[in-house]
Structures are given as C-alpha cells and as structure tokens.
Image (spheres, helix red, strand yellow):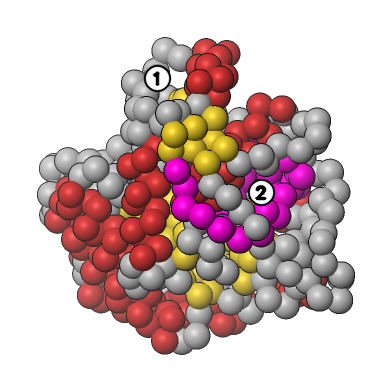
Amino acid sequence: MPRNPRPRPDETLSRVLARAARICSRVIIGLLLVVGDAARFGAAVPHTSAAAEPTISNISELSIDTGQMNHLGDTRRYNYVILQEYMYSRIGEIKRANPRTKVLAYLEAATVRARGCGADPAPRSHTPHDSFAVDYCYAARAHPEWFLHNSVGRHLAYADYPRYMVMDVGNRSYQRTWVADAIAAARSDGFDGVYLDDVNTYPGHGIGGQIAEYTDRAYGRAMTSFLVTASTELRASGLVVAANVAANPWIAWQRAYGLEIASHLSAYVREHYSRYGDICGPFSERFAATAGRDTPPLADLLTYDRAVQAAGAHLLGIDYGYSPATATDLAAAAYGRAVFLLAWDGRAGGAYVYRPCGPVDPASASWTLDLGAPTTAAVLTGAVYRRSYS
C-alpha cells in the first residue's frame, strides 16, 4: 500500500510530467532499457528460453487490485507474483507456467479492517481468503488491548484508509496470533509465502505523533520486534517472506531498524522505488543524481539498497503508474528498472515491479528486457550513472 505520498498539494498532473521530463533531460541513467518505440502495456514480451525450460529474471508482478488478477499476462519470467489471498485460484496456472515462480499472499501486518460484527459470539481470528491476517471482530471481542489509541482514547485509524484500525504490533499476543493465522492461510491456499504490507519503521499513513501508546521511534522498535517474530516463524515453516518496509535511510534510527528487518527477510520491498507518489498519481519528480525540492539524492537510496542486500535480503523495488498504458508510464517503468539495475547485487531473488494503474497486463519490452548479470559496479560520472551488464 502506498504510504506518505509527497506530491505538492497545488501541483497538477501536467506540471508533474513536465518536471519529470526536465529531470530526465538532465540526468541519464546509463542503461539502455528502452527498445524501439514505446511499446504498449500488454504487448507480447519475447522470451529467450524455450518453454520447456522457463527462466527466472529480475522482474516480478504485483496484482492486488480488483480485476488485476485477470490480466496477469505471461508470468513465466517473473520470480514473484504477489496476489491478494482471495486470488489463490490463480496459483495453479502460474505454477504450470513456471514451477519456480514464487506466489506470495498479500497480508496486512499492522492493521485490521473494521466491519460490522453482528451477533456472532465467537468470530474466528482469521476470515478465510481475507488479506488481513487478524479479523477485526475477533480482535474487538477477544483482545481489545490489541488496538492502539489516539490522545483522547479512541481507536486509531489510518488517515488515508479510515477503516484500517491500527494494532499494537509490539504486543506478543497479537504477534503470535498474526503469525499463526498467516501460516495457516498460506498453507491452506497453496501460496509459497507472504507479502507483509505496512512494515513501517515510523507510523506513516497520517498517524505520526498521534499514537498514545508509542512515540514514533518506539513504534518503529515495536514494528521491528513484530517483523523479527513473524519472519522467523514464517521462514521456519518453509515460507518465503517479503515485507514492504518504510524507512528513510537518512534518519539514523529508521535506517537501523530497516537494516535489522532486512536481516530477517527473504526479500525487502522498497515501494515508490524511483519516485514518490500514489497509485494512479500524481507523482513527484523521479529520484535523480541531485536532490529535488521534494526528493532525496539517488545516491542515498542506492547506498541503502546495497546495505539491505548486504544484510541478507533480496531487493524488490516497486513503482506505480499514473495510467494503464501511456508513453509516460513506459518511460517511468524503464527508468525505475534502470535504477534497480544500478543497485542489484546480481543474486537470483531480487526483482523490479512496475504496477500500472488499473487492470492491465504490466509487461512491456521497454522495461522487461533481460540484460544478464552485472559485470561492474555502478559509477557516477557527472550526472550520468553507468553500469555494465553481461
């Protein structure tokens, strides 16, 4: 889920795109990813291996919105496909296309979704095929201490998702229940692992400074405790664990928590990988060699990506589109993949994801081109990053 987008409040889409174009004219990432004309999303993507021996490259797919599971396209080269738990019926076809593709179930880590509870005296801790590992009604009736509160004692909810009630991720009982439900759900539905969303080293979603039980930094510590517990048990159960982690690497305690979390994960997800913004826009400028008004310098993020991988996790970068199929989206996808290829350590298991707006096959030759393995480190000369691939 997108967190804390940073568009300028008075900024129109045309201004966003104009600024992005200016940045692209000044800063070139020296990896030739855009091939031919701007191919449209959904176009056939050539494969370099025979169908009998599918390969895994460093691209993946996130398909969690309504209708998107019907537009998965050719999943043979994706090393991960991330689905909502209720989309489990598509696992079989993904595995038939390539048995080595890991299919992960999206599960919210830090919240439950409020709903009407009716008269059921004993709701289950997890509703089957729900993307929240813990059920709201179960928590409300059996464990009211799991809910976090604002300064006037009310249950705290995300500002941008008001039905998402914020839970005490540092509570050991909540941690144990969440993990048990996640393991049972993944195994029951046939997933290879889980994708934990909202593993935030700071509160995010408009609730910073509003948690009665925690300071923002203490919340990050609690989240780290939750992730260590969850990932340790999930991986011990044979499941792949990817987590969407929010951490600003230029803030020392967030960097420390983020890297501690990375050391326990199969894959560390950095969302809004090459630009801030939200699904379907608007977006701020792409991260560039020098900092913009609202963006950090690219070097800070690349350095952090390398530290994440050195800690043991594979790197997953996720970017979002403004619209389903435009040249601007294709340019953003190519740029984001280039940034990923500057940071990637070459290990199988890392991946870049571009998720367009709406139900549409995201694949296009303009950003899925297989460049092989890195043969040199990334080098910045002037305003140009360059890195050689095999």
Looking at the image, can residue 39 be seen? Answer: yes
From mark 2 to mark 1, how far is it between C-alphas?
28 Å
Q: Give the range drawn in magenta.
A: 352-379
Residue 225 rendering spot, x and y as whole percentages: 23, 69
Near-viewer residue (265 or 342): 342
The main secondary structure of the magenta stretch is loop
For image coordinates 47% across by 65% down, the residue present is 314
Q: Which of marks 2 and 1 is in front?
A: 1
Label number found at residue 66 = 2
Q: Is residue 314 left or right of residue 246?
A: right
Q: Which of marks 2 and 1 is nearer the N terminus?
A: 1
Q: Is residue 159 left or right of residue 66?
A: left
**Amino acid marked by disc 2:** Thr
Residue 370 on the magenta segment: yes
**Amino acid marked by disc 1:** Arg
Looking at the image, can residue 124 be seen? Answer: no
For image coordinates 72% across by 63% down, the residue present is 77
Residue 303 rendering spot, x and y as whole percentages: 35, 49
Q: In which quarter of the image is residue 266?
A: bottom left
Can you identify the residue that label 1 sits on?
8
Residue 76 rendering spot, x and y as whole percentages: 76, 65
Q: Is residue 151 left or right of residue 349?
A: left
Disc 2 + disc 1, Cβ < 8 Å: no
* 10 Å crowding of disc 2: few (<14), some (14-19), many (20+): few
For image coordinates 62% across by 71% down, the residue present is 102
For image coordinates 63% across by 79% down, the residue present is 190
